[in-house]
Image (cartoon, rainbow, N blue to C red):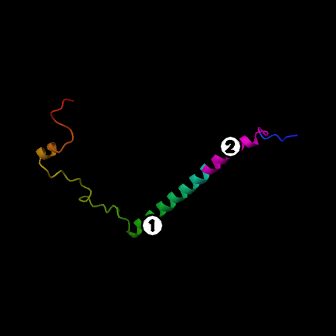
C-alpha cells in the first residue's frame, strides 16, 4: 500500500506557520542586538567626546542663519513660476 503524503494530522501545516515565525523572531533579535550595540557605542563615544554631532550647549551655534541673497535672487531661483496661476 502507498504511504499517505498529504494531510498528516496537521503537524505539516504547523511547520508552514512555525518556520517563518522562528525566522522572523531570529532576525528581529539580531536587529535589536545590533541597534542596542550601536546605541551603546554612541553613548560611549559621546561620553568620551568623540561623537561628531555632540551638543555643546552653545546658543550661537544652534541659531539658524538667514539666506544672504537679496529677495529678488531668491524669487528668481524659485522652482515655481510666479506668473503661473495657482
Q: Is residue 35 left or right of residue 67?
A: right
Image-quadrant location for residue 32: bottom right
At x 19%, y 42%, the residue is 78
At x 55%, y 58%, the residue is 33
Image-quadrant location for residue 81: top left
At x 38%, y 68%, the residue is 50
- Picture disc at residue 44: 1
Count residues near mark 1 (Cα–Cα under 10 Å), then give few for <14, some for 14-19, many for 20+.
few
Q: Position of residue 71 (x, y in %)?
A: 12, 45
At x 18%, y 50%, the residue is 67
Q: Is residue 1 left or right of residue 11?
A: right
Q: Nearer the viewer, residue 56 or 13?
A: 13
Q: Is residue 12 left or right of residue 49?
A: right
Q: Position of residue 40 (x, y in %)?
A: 48, 63
Q: In this picture, is 52 found above or below 78?
A: below
Image-quadrant location for residue 12: top right
Count residues near mark 2 (Cα–Cα under 10 Å), then give few for <14, some for 14-19, many for 20+.
few
Look at the numbered disc 2 and give the secondary structure of its residue.
helix
Q: Is residue 47 left or right of residue 62?
A: right
Q: Which residue is mark 2?
A: 16
The span shown in magenta is 6-23
The first of marks 2 and 1 along the sequence is: 2
Q: Residue farthest to the right?
A: 1
- Picture disc at residue 24: none
Q: Position of residue 55 (x, y in %)?
A: 33, 61
Q: Tell me, yes or no, whether the highlighted magenta stretch contains residue 16.
A: yes
Q: Position of residue 52 (x, y in %)?
A: 35, 64
Q: Tell me, yes or no, whether the highlighted magenta stretch contains residue 9.
A: yes
Q: Nearer the viewer, residue 7 or 59?
A: 7
Q: Nearer the viewer, residue 61 or 32?
A: 32
Q: In this picture, is 21 found above or below 50?
A: above
Amino acid at each position: 500500500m502507498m504511504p499517505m503524503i498529504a494531510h498528516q494530522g496537521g503537524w505539516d501545516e504547523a511547520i508552514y506557520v512555525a518556520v517563518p515565525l522562528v525566522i522572523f523572531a531570529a532576525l528581529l533579535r539580531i536587529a535589536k542586538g545590533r541597534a542596542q550595540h550601536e546605541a551603546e557605542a554612541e553613548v560611549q563615544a559621546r561620553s568620551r567626546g568623540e561623537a561628531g554631532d555632540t551638543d555643546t550647549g552653545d546658543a550661537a551655534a544652534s541659531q539658524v542663519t538667514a539666506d544672504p541673497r537679496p529677495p529678488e535672487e531668491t524669487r528668481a531661483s524659485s522652482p515655481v513660476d510666479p506668473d503661473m496661476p495657482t
